[in-house]
Image: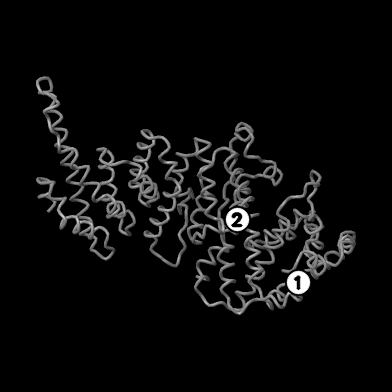
Amino acid sequence: LGFAFIQHPSLMFEQEVKTLYNSILSDKNCSVNLKIQVLKNLQTYLQEEDTRMQQADRDWKKVAKQEDLKEMGDISSGMSSSIMQLYLKQVLEAFFHTQSSVRHFALNVIALTLNQGLIHPVQCVPYLIAMGTDPEPSMRNKADQQLVEIDKKYAGFIHMKAVAGMKMSYQVQQAINTCPKDPVRGFRHDESSSALCSHLYSMIRGNRQHRRAFLISLLNLFDDTAKTEVNMLLYIADNLACFPYQTQEEPLFIMHHIDITLSVSGSNLLQSFKESMVKDKKKERKPSSDEETESDSNSGSESESEEEASKPRRLRKRADSDSDSDEENDINAVMKCLPENSAPLIEFANVSQGILLLLMLKQHLKNLCGFSDSKIQKYSPSESAKVYDKAINRKTGVHFHPKQTLDFLRSDMANSKITEEVKRSIVKQYLDFKLLMEHLDPDEEEEDGEVSASTNARNKAITSLLGGGSPKNNAAETEDDESDGEDRGGGTSGVRRR
């Protein structure tokens, strides 16, 4: 068939041929050899057409002086364009095939089509971005090269389709992933640990406006209303953690927006969890009742917590161990109020993954670039670009490993039966989360060099949420050590400030 179509291209418009080609390309169960044959046929046709056009061009140059353009009817060039538009969608979809040979031929056909200018390039951009994450270097380079060509001719096309391209690259990685139990990750598993979409980012980062719009669109996917699946969020967080940032402004901008997303999504999440609890036991539900009862039940009056602060350190150490049992009581109190239907719990665990990933990402970027809390808080996106144009000093050996989300995906918690132990861990997560939300805004009255109780509580909640060791494990007795007792007891500073 392929040879027949080279001689008589008009046959490719026949209904039977269209149905045959498109069904072979789009049918998942169709044999790989057949798919490759169809792609090869299209590839050979385009190559022959190209040769024919070059020959016609040479012939035309010989007689160009005598001929009259008005009398010439050049039909052939329009035909290959019409043919490729018939089969384009199916060829592009072949990028999502598990076999690299199918992807290889599909990419060849698209490259030929673009080089001959037969289609509008914008529809191929997301697919080329996706192919830029292919494990095979030759395919990656070819796709990246096509993107560079498109970017030269049509500025702004890449940025316009960047987020769609990221989502498609996740689909390509899903197709390639041989072990379905393992979550899809967004960086290369070699010594470079570079982001899969690092080439895309390096193309966009030069334009400040485009870069910011791209980063904000990615962070918006973590919003609780976006309902993005957890593994895709992990994939995007991996990319954001490993992008080739060059100036301080880039990671600081991400952290700034993570804080904004956290404050909105976090409150929504806590609210929906509270609403799902059994209402009639409101009185015995300490941790989730209103702020007044919270400050009463958790730590008595304000004067009590002040007394706590003035106790000698040894006594406070003992108070700290008591606060662990307080926390245990809190967990039990919430456990009593859980509804029998565990759907809201699963929903909470699912939605909270996005927020946990953002927390992890912020922590990772902070460690990677060595930023202090005050530097992150002082950052304002509206300041002139020059202020944060300094190069980043990357630390080596800092890896992004969101343990909780990986465990969540590996255990397939969203579809598994909920046990008492899982319930407890979700409730513990909820309480840590609540503490974090109370202390999310840094204290204005904080003096330089001093760690305020609120900052302390925030760090403690983050550590607990991310499953790391608590700050008091540090060998040096720091300010953290000092205010452990009062904060764990009930985070009154946040309530008092309100």
User: Left or right: 374 with respect to 483?
Assistant: left
- Badge 2: residue crowd in 10 Å (few <14, some 14–19, many ≥20): many
First-in-chain label (2 vs 1): 1
Q: Which mark is residue 286?
A: 1
Q: Residue at x 27, y 49 (%)?
A: 88
Q: Is residue 184 left or right of residue 70?
A: right
Residue 344 placement (x, y as % from top left): 58, 71
Which residue is drawn at the image coordinates 15% and 30% (left, top)? 57
Residue 376 image-quadrant placement: top right
**Callout 1, which amino acid?**
Lys
Looking at the rendered image, the quarter that the C terminus falls into is bottom right
Callouts 2 and 1 close, C-beta under 8 Å: no
The vertical placement of 166 against 315, above or below, is: above
- Name the quadrant containing residue 453: bottom right
Which residue type does callout 2 highlight?
A: Met
In what element is the residue under mark 1? loop
In the depicted structure, whether residue 129 falls above or below residue 282: above
Q: Find residue 98 and report its horizontal and vertical position in percent.
A: 33, 59
Q: Using the rendered image of the protein, determine whether residue 311 is visible from the camera's viewpoint.
A: no
Q: Which sits in the foreground, 320 or 351?
A: 351
Judging from the image, what secondary structure is the residue with disc 2 in?
A: helix
* Residue 167, disc: none
Query: Which quadrant of the figure contains the N terminus?
Result: bottom left
Whether residue 277 is situated above or below residue 313 in the rendered picture: below
Give residue 395's position: percent from left, percent from top: 59, 45
In the image, residue 339 sits, relative to residue 440, either above or below, namely below
Q: Nearer the viewer, mark 2 or mark 1?
A: 1
- Tell me if mark 1 has few (under 14), some (14-19) or many (20+) residues whose alpha carbon lies within 10 angstroms of its own: many
> Is 180 displayed left or right of 33 in the figure?
right
Residue with the mark numbered 2: 360
Q: Residue at x 23, y 46 (%)?
A: 84
Q: Exactly how many numbered labels are in the figure?
A: 2
